[in-house]
């Protein structure tokens, strides 16, 4: 499918949103503020927003967005979620007079894949600012899939992300965030608790930044060493955002290893390390780390049993128990928070 027209309009950062218009035979990506009213059915919070504190965007899913089974790649949805978050955060952080900034993703608190999205369905992504600290913004995102033949919609993804405003003059400088106004004091207190919790987890992540995945020759099946893999990639301009992140020219090493398995799921830890090739004075540093949970599905889309991981060393056993704790916590949250369907 050839791209017939592509226009990018950039207004002053933060004053107005960067609006994309992609037109091909069946494709159109637009920002639609008026669509937000239809999303209220799936919201449980009532935060008093000024204009620009919530947005919605949508795009039809094409064959090149999906895998061989016809399900849309998780990365495609994650990209739309992050784009919605950076738009709403940047807009809010520039809502007052002062030094101009761009909101940078600091942490993906959690992302839940509740249901697969398929080719031909329309993805509706809604983002809302739910809490602000002095230097960060919490954004909660919901994704709905729409069958354009029947008009039915279902919730497919939920995500919570944190952004920080970086000065356009000096990207190492973090600016202050304008506060939002809450209808009830309890909402601010709940947001503060979430902020403190993720702050503690972030400190724990920094403590583990020295952890390196070392390759092991001829590992035994079902062990952590057997699951380890690494990918080295040179970051180029096509890997960067509109604002120049990621910085082109850094060599990144992406390492992954299995940390935990339940009966039908597995947890994978991913570590991203960067090696600057231009500035020799800067050493390798941990750019990002994350935990991903996967399930094995048969052709009918039903979960299959997962071969059980065999932890060998004390560190592997410790990571296994930590993964088990995250699994039980995630399972409890998933069972206790069922979103209403529109």
Image (cartoon, grey):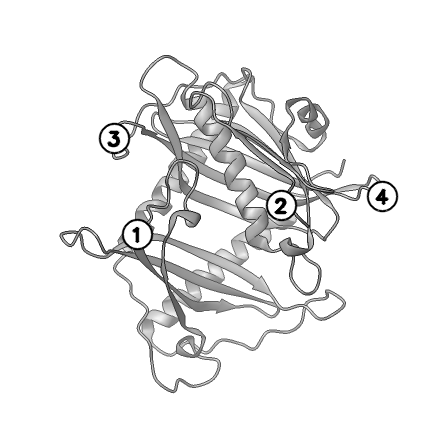
Viewer-proximal residue among 117 and 205 = 117
Query: What secondary structure is found at the residue carrying circle 4?
Result: loop
Q: Are marks 3 and 1 in contact (CB under 8 Å)?
A: no
Choose mark 3 or mark 2, whichever is in front: 3
Quadrant assignment, res 57 = top right
Disc 2: which residue: 157
Q: Residues within 10 Å of mark 4 (few under 14, many from 20)?
A: few
Q: Residues within 10 Å of mark 2 (few under 14, many from 20)?
A: many
Disc 3 to disc 1, how far (Cα)? Answer: 19 Å
Q: Residues within 10 Å of mark 3 (few under 14, many from 20)?
A: few
Using the rendered image of the protein, determine whether residue 124 is visible from the camera's viewpoint.
Answer: no
Lower position in the chain sequence, tag 1 or tag 4: 4
Disc 4: which residue: 149
Disc 3 to disc 2, how far (Cα)? Answer: 34 Å
Q: Are marks 3 and 2 in contact (CB under 8 Å)?
A: no
Q: Is residue 9 above or below residue 246?
A: above
In this picture, residue 297 sits left or right of residue 182: right
Disc 1 to disc 2, how far (Cα)? Answer: 33 Å
Q: Residues within 10 Å of mark 1 (few under 14, many from 20)?
A: some
In this picture, residue 109 sits left or right of residue 218: right
Q: Are marks 1 and 2 in contact (CB under 8 Å)?
A: no
The structure residue drawn at horizontal position 59% and vertical position 74%, both measured from the top left corner, is 306
Choose mark 1 or mark 4, whichever is in front: 1
Disc 4 to disc 2, how far (Cα)? Answer: 21 Å
Disc 3: which residue: 170
Residue 288 in picture, x, y percent from top left: 36, 52
Disc 1: which residue: 249
Residue 106 in picture, x, y percent from top left: 38, 40
The structure residue drawn at horizontal position 47% and vertical position 22%, both measured from the top left corner, is 11
Choose mark 4 or mark 2, whichever is in front: 4
The structure residue drawn at horizontal position 51% and vertical position 38%, both measured from the top left corner, is 83
């Amino acid at each position: 499918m050839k791209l017939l027209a592509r226009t990018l309009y950039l207004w002053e950062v933060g004053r107005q949103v960067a609006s994309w218009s992609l037109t091909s035979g069946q494709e159109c990506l637009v920002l639609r503020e008026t669509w937000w009213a239809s999303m209220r059915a799936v919201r449980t919070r009532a935060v008093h927003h000024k204009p620009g504190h919530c947005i919605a965007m949508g795009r039809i899913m094409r064959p090149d967005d999906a895998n061989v089974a016809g399900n849309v790649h998780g990365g495609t949805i994650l990209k739309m979620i992050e784009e919605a978050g950076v738009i709403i955060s940047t807009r809010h952080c520039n809502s007052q007079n002062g030094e101009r900034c761009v909101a940078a993703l600091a942490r993906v608190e959690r992302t839940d894949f509740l249901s697969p999205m398929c080719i031909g369905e329309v993805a509706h992504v809604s983002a809302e600012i739910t809490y602000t600290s002095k230097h960060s913004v919490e954004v909660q995102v919901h994704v709905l899939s729409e069958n354009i033949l029947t008009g039915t919609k279902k919730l497919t993804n939920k995500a919570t992300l944190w952004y920080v405003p970086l000065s356009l003059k000096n990207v190492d400088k973090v600016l202050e965030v304008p506060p939002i106004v809450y209808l009830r004091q309890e909402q601010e207190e709940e947001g503060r608790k979430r902020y403190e919790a993720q702050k503690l987890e972030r400190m724990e992540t920094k403590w583990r930044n020295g952890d390196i995945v070392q390759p092991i020759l001829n590992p035994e099946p079902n062990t952590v060493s057997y699951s380890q893999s690494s990918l080295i990639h040179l970051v180029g301009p096509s890997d960067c955002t509109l604002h120049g992140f990621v910085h082109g020219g850094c060599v990144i090493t992406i390492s992954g290893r299995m940390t935990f398995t339940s009966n039908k799921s597995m947890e994978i830890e991913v570590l991203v390390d960067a090696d600057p090739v231009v500035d020799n004075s800067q050493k390798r540093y941990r750019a990002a780390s994350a935990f991903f949970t996967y399930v094995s599905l048969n052709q009918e889309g039903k979960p299959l049993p997962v071969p059980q991981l065999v932890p060998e060393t004390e560190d592997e056993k410790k990571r296994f128990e930590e993964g088990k704790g995250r699994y039980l916590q995630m399972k409890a949250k998933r069972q206790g928070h069922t979103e209403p369907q529109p």
